[in-house]
Image (cartoon, grey):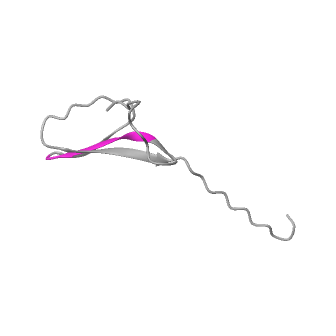
């Protein structure tokens, strides 16, 4: 699946690939990978969070 300029990612996320599920099971494809859907299938876009949480704990002044 090609990422399109018309695709809007969820807030704080980037495209992280595609997952297809059909009668043969589930397969995951990296961004830019090519694949062909030849039967009824569920296609799911995968998103990766770009938010990182940093926790800083002050202990004894160090």
Query: Is 52 placed above or below 28 here?
Result: below
The answer to whether 38 appears left or right of 16 in the picture is left
Residue drawn at 75 percent across, 66 percent down: 57
Position of the N terminus by quadrant: top left
Residue drawn at 49 percent across, 48 percent down: 11
Front residue of 51/29: it is 51
The answer to whether 13 appears left or right of 45 in the picture is right
Magenta: main secondary structure: strand
Q: How many marks?
A: 0
Splitting the image into 4 quarters, where does residue 29 fall? top left
Residue 33 falls inside the magenta stretch: no
Residue 42 location in percent, x, y? 21, 46
Front residue of 3/62: it is 3
Residue 44 location in percent, x, y? 30, 46
Position of the C terminus by quadrant: bottom right
Residue 21 location in percent, x, y? 22, 47
Q: Residue furthest right?
A: 61
Residue drawn at 41 percent across, 30 percent down: 5
Q: Which span is picked out in magenta? A: 15-23
The answer to whether 61 appears left or right of 21 in the picture is right
Q: Residue furthest front?
A: 6
The answer to whether 48 appears left or right of 21 in the picture is right
Q: Residue furthest bottom?
A: 60
Residue drawn at 68 percent across, 61 percent down: 55
């Amino acid at each position: 699946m090609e990422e399109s300029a018309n695709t809007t990612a969820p807030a704080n996320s980037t495209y992280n690939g595609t997952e297809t599920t059909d009668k043969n099971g589930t397969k995951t494809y990296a961004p830019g990978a090519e694949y062909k859907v030849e039967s009824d299938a569920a296609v799911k876009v995968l998103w990766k969070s770009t938010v990182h949480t940093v926790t800083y704990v002050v202990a004894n002044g160090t």
